Amino acid sequence: MAHTVHIEPFDIDISAEDNASLAEIVNGLGIDFPCGGKGLCGNCHIELVKGTMEISAREKALLERKGLDSSRWRLACCGRITDDIVIRIPVREQVILTDDSSSRLYGEDGLAAAVDLGSTTIVVQLIDRKNGAVLESFSEINGQNVFGADIISRIAYALQGPEYSERLALTVREQVGRMAGDAVKASGRDDIRNVTIVGNSVMHHLFCKLDVTPLSAYPFLSPYNGRMEFTPSELGWNLPETCTVRFMQNISHFVGSDILAGILHTGIHRKDRWCALLDLGTNGEIVIGNRERILCTSTAAGPAFEGVNIVNGMRAVSGAVCRIDETSGKAEIIGNTRPSGICGSGLIDAIHYFLKTGRITPDGRIADDSPGRLEIAGGVALYDRDIREFQLAKAAVATGFELLMKHLGISLTDIDKIYIAGGLGNYIDISKARETGLIKAIGNSQIVKAGNSALAGCKEMTFSASDREIEAILPLVSHYSLETDPDFQDRYCENLFF
Amino acid sequence: MANLEGLYEAILNGKLEQAVEVTNAAIAEGIDPQTIINGYMVKGMEEIGARFEAGKAFVPNLLMSARAMKGALDILKPLLKAENATSAGTIVIGTVKGDLHDIGKNLVASMLEGCGFEVINLGVDVSGEKFVEAAKEHNADIICMSALLTTTMNYMKEVVSAVEAAGIRDKVKIMVGGAPLNNDFAMAIGADGYSSNANDAVAMARRLLSA
Ligand code: B12
Ligand code: FES
């Protein structure tokens, strides 16, 4: 027997077989499945407006942990259709960090597209290579997001069979191709010379249809980390055949061309003094280097800074608590609306504020006998497990940073500048990030917000003049493997404290 | 007199140096190692476990306590006479093949050890073969497996099969844990027990062995 599923706010009806999976029905409608649809994270919630749908005890527990009423909410990845129902999908707007500055390089012919292919977001910018100016800028959520939020969840999805990895490849190929095509069309020109893509190593492998099995477990040795070139027709893209599409090379198995672009843009390879580059995303890449030597690693901090796995967590969009006044404790809300959650920068501020006022102890406990939560504003609160998540993530970043310095035989005083890359990096309060132990630095002046340095570097990569520079960077770079460092555990323990 | 209460305090508060100092003093005075362990160390670990349970202590505290306990235990262990050592059971523990995350696993190992179990820690990237071999060699009561990656947790099923194939499945219980797992997964792969944290792991181990 078939049932009808009516989906708000899109006002569409879908007919579903009895016992069909809700996840498949809502696929592509903007719901993320951060744990890969395994019913573990509780992030794929949708509202059940009308009709009945069974719910398991575990689903109930997950929803309640998110503060959602289980008589009204369901997890899309657990749901089965057994009735005619009406559901509503929570619509999330997105703020994606782009970089509208002109490229440092210029003076070559024609157009080029720079693509920052992140696990979560994709930014495509069309630039005029004559003067380096940005002509068009498009950003979207990576369509693969519905198959899992972090790179390991994507790999787990791909490993289910060839049709699964094919689906992941086609999803991004189509999406990037469409975005690049739209950008070219909008410019009204047709002299595009290249599309240059940077991304982490998993994005690289999935886009290029390389086997991700080697990236799924130790020793993570990928057979092919090099630069890959395609013709538009090979990818099914509607661009002139004279245009080359290139996915830039990875630095190592878990440090991709996005970081290579970051190095190129910040110019670490030209500095006399040590400089660091810190990406506060899920993979937590860290680079420390100068013109003689560059060492990099990834610390797998997890998505806490993006508001994932935080009870009232949300992305930095309207309704998110994004800042908390240090003295009054007053919350600032994006869009000045009723608060509906807390985003990464708000999380850091909240923890900082409660630490300062003694409501959180240095070991991360909530000091008074409050029932495991600290009210922030209008029902939005910080829960004790949010503090744990934050501790795990910030300790990973801090420990990775310390161990890179140790391995290089240097200390903080030897470091001239610490560049903070990535979305969160741009919005955080630097002093608070320092005081909560997320960023190690001697003073605020050592820290520089570098914006979307992957995109900025990628724009430079669209010029053939950058090739020589990349050739100069690569021999300087080596990867440091934190998992084999015997000091990790002890340092990590210490860094868990505030 | 060595201040053995101080050892209890040191473990509870995660003070490694203090724990080592008191232990050394106690040994110098000829106090029986087993008395030090059962009388003070186990109590300290149990207390920090209880506080964890009550939401009064968290992972960082557990880790620091485990480190202090380990420091003291490393001094005492060689002094224990095999014949009168009392053990709550023998456990072989490791992180499964392909996975190098070991902080959680080491914490579980320390808690078990601190609560009187004999623990053989096989480290990381452990194959089914190695688990089986170690379980046989040490006559283990429980095999404990840890995984932190969604891609490596599936390997646990292969270890369960390897244990079955070796014909020792009826002699050894299997317990699993790690952030991406849950009880349903544990049951689906044929394990006997799962717990979400190091403290519950001790209770679960005791339960499995009394069953
Ligand atoms: C520290 C860390 C690392 C360290 C590990 C150092 C070490 N020696 O262990 C380093 C930086 C090396 C690392 C590397 C990688 N990591 Co890592 N890492 C983490 C991090 C930040 C914390 C894990 C941790 O130690 N938690 C603290 C301990 C105490 O908790 P726990 O392990 O969960 O253990 C508790 C329970 O689970 C339980 N338990 C655990 N084992 C057992 C066993 C039994 C029998 C029982 C009963 C109970 C039990 O009890 C424990 C104590 O209460 C998490 C993210 C996060 N915020 O959690 C990512 C995370 C686990 N890593 C991840 C990834 C992807 C990686 C890498 C593949 C990639 C990378 N470098 O970017 C590599 C792979 C290395 C490898 N080959 O395994 C992902 C996994 C994603 C997924 N879907 O699977 C995570 C979740 C981050 C993320 N979202 O991206 N990582
Ligand atoms: S609970 Fe559904 S995706 Fe995680």
Image (cartoon, grey):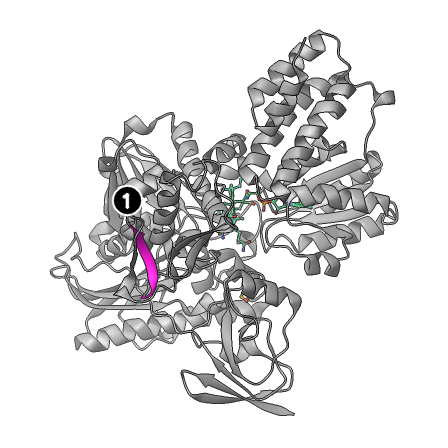
Q: Residue at x 65, y 70 (%)?
A: A56
Q: Can residue A418 be seen in the rendering of this structure?
A: yes
Query: Is residue B153 rendered to the left or right of residue A348?
Result: right
Classify the position of the N terminus of chain B by image quarter: top right
**Residue holding disc 1:** A327
Q: Position of residue A90 (x, y in %)?
A: 43, 74
In this rendered view, identify the residue nearer to me: A416 or A469: A416
Query: Which stretch appears magenta?
Result: A318-324
Q: Position of residue A124 (x, y in %)?
A: 28, 66
Q: Residues within 10 Å of mark 1 (few under 14, many from 20)?
A: few
Query: Is residue A212 rendered to the left or right of residue B34?
Result: left
Position of A95 relative to B178 (above/below): below
Query: Is residue A268 rendered to the left or right of residue A301?
Result: left
In this rendered view, identify the residue nearer to me: A27 or A333: A333
Q: Secondary structure at mark 1?
A: loop
Of helix, strand and loop, which mostly describes the magenta segment?
Answer: strand
What type is the residue that disc 1 sits on? Thr
Q: Residue at x 64, y 86 (%)?
A: A18
Q: Position of residue A174 (x, y in %)?
A: 39, 74
**Residue furthest out toward the bottom:** A1
In this rendered view, identify the residue nearer to me: A457 or A410: A410
Query: Is residue A41 rendered to the left or right of residue B160?
Result: left
In this rendered view, identify the residue nearer to me: A488 or A315: A315
Position of A83 relative to A332 (above/below): below
